Image: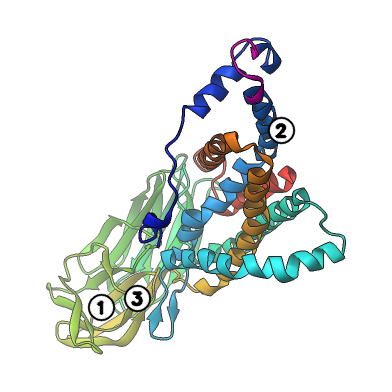
Amino acid sequence: CFVAGKKLYVIKTPAGNVLGKVSTCIGREHWLDNADDKYDRGLIEDIKSLLRVLVLFIPLPVFWALFDQQGSRWTFQADRMEQDIGSWTLKADQMQVLNPLLILIFIPLFEVAIYPFMTKCRLISKPLHKMIWGGLLAAAAFVISGIVELNLLPTYGTPLVEGYSQLRVYNGFNCNYTFTSFEPYNNSTSDFNIGPLSVYENLEMDAITFPNISYALRGVNGECIDNPHIGSFSVSSSTANSFFINNQGIHAFVDNNDKPIDGVYVRFLVNSARAVPVTIVDSSKNRTKLSLDSNDKGQKKISKGSGDIIVDGQTVLKDFKFRAGAVYTINVYNDSNSIFVANPLTITPPNSVHILWLIPQYVVMTMGEVMFSVTGLEFSFTQAPATMKSVLQSVWLLTVAFGNLIVVLIVEGHFLNAQVKNYRIFYRKNGKNC
């Protein structure tokens, strides 16, 4: 639209370097009034008016620090949410379309209805009051965002912690094991049952003090009785150490429970005397989602959706739903009759909180933008001298840069590990700012 109407614009060529004059005039040792020997009195008075307006810009960086989270933190938040609306998928970055759409709705709505109502209720009487309310709304948007994040936390994978290891023992047999581990910190033993094709998890192993854990695996029934194992597990700090019990012994590997941003992680642990083909077929589209050899125990990334899991020509799981954001381990066993049985294990839960729960925080943030940013820009341009408007625009853009710097200092400072704590900091800063 702007390009098409360019011929209709009145484009004036800039006359002189106003920003340069402002900078050099302010730089005088005895401030502005002592610069009248070099600069005309009109310029000095205009700069004085400009400085009075720039006081209003002091809280702007904090507001932009919050506002710009829509394209970063809030988008990352949306990546970890359920995005399906019926047969349609709403992508995380598509949520940002809400802001310009709401702006088009809110600006006339505020002018026609909300501002008159607030004036009648004596909530606002001047532009500064609007900006205060706008800042409070921006802070409130991050309170809402923090609540959403608290509901998302249970769906994230258990994070690795420095000094600790995550231990998982996968039972590759269709029978029960008793897992006895020696706990050196209290000089005792603990017994745990590992069910058929199941997994034992200890997600807080002290890997620094006790890097080796003695264990005994004894079968309770079936083939497990004939396959006892006694030994020790070696675990490493900040590592997900996993072990797979099968016919050949115990296979050690490093697990990964990080939630995928797009798609699903899946790993096949097949306990078979011979290598067999494993495929995942999307029956609705008649195409193969994944094909591998059973000796390949690596983690694979596939698209979300239902699929049939076929091992050596046998369908072991029909229409299994691979949900977005989940990490699955498919435990498969080949019995004495050459029949394959499978048990899907969910290592990391799928995305379960719907992306539409982000709408309230976008609505509140956009309301804050209308009251804070639009009002501030309008007030500044009406109060600033005509000769200083280009300087004013430059400083306005500079406040956005300082807002981004605040985000970098908070997020990359490594003193806040959880995202919900970052939201709490942004909320407090903007709340105090108002």
- How far across and how far down the image is residue 128, in percent? 76, 48
**Closer to us: 55 or 238:** 55
Q: Residues within 10 Å of mark 2 (few under 14, many from 20)?
A: few
- How far across and how far down the image is residue 64, in percent? 57, 47
The residue that disc 1 covers is: 333
Which numbered mark, 2 or 1, is in the foreground of this view? 2
The answer to whether 350 appears left or right of 267 in the picture is: right
Q: Residues within 10 Å of mark 3 (few under 14, many from 20)?
A: many
Q: Amino acid at mark 3?
A: Leu
**Of pointers 3 and 2, the one earlier in the residue sequence:** 2
Seen at 38% across and 45% down, the residue is: 236
Q: Amino acid at mark 2?
A: Arg
Is residue 353 in view?
no
Is residue 278 in view?
yes
Cα separation between marks 1 and 3: 8 Å
Seen at 59% across and 54% down, the residue is: 420
Q: Amino acid at mark 1?
A: Tyr
Cα separation between marks 3 and 2: 72 Å
Magenta range is 35-42
The answer to whether 287 appears left or right of 99 in the picture is: left
Q: Could you tell me which secondary element the residue under label 1 belongs to?
A: strand
Q: Quadrant of residue 51?
A: top right
The answer to whether 308 appears left or right of 193 in the picture is: left
- How far across and how far down the image is residue 69, in percent? 52, 53
- How far across and how far down the image is residue 241, in percent? 36, 54
**Of pointers 2 and 1, the one earlier in the residue sequence:** 2
The disc placed on residue 197 is: 3
The residue that disc 2 covers is: 52
Seen at 64% across and 68% down, the residue is: 108
**Of pointers 1 and 3, the one earlier in the residue sequence:** 3
**Closer to us: 332 or 301:** 301
> Does the residue at mark 1 contact the one at mark 3 (Cβ under 8 Å)?
yes
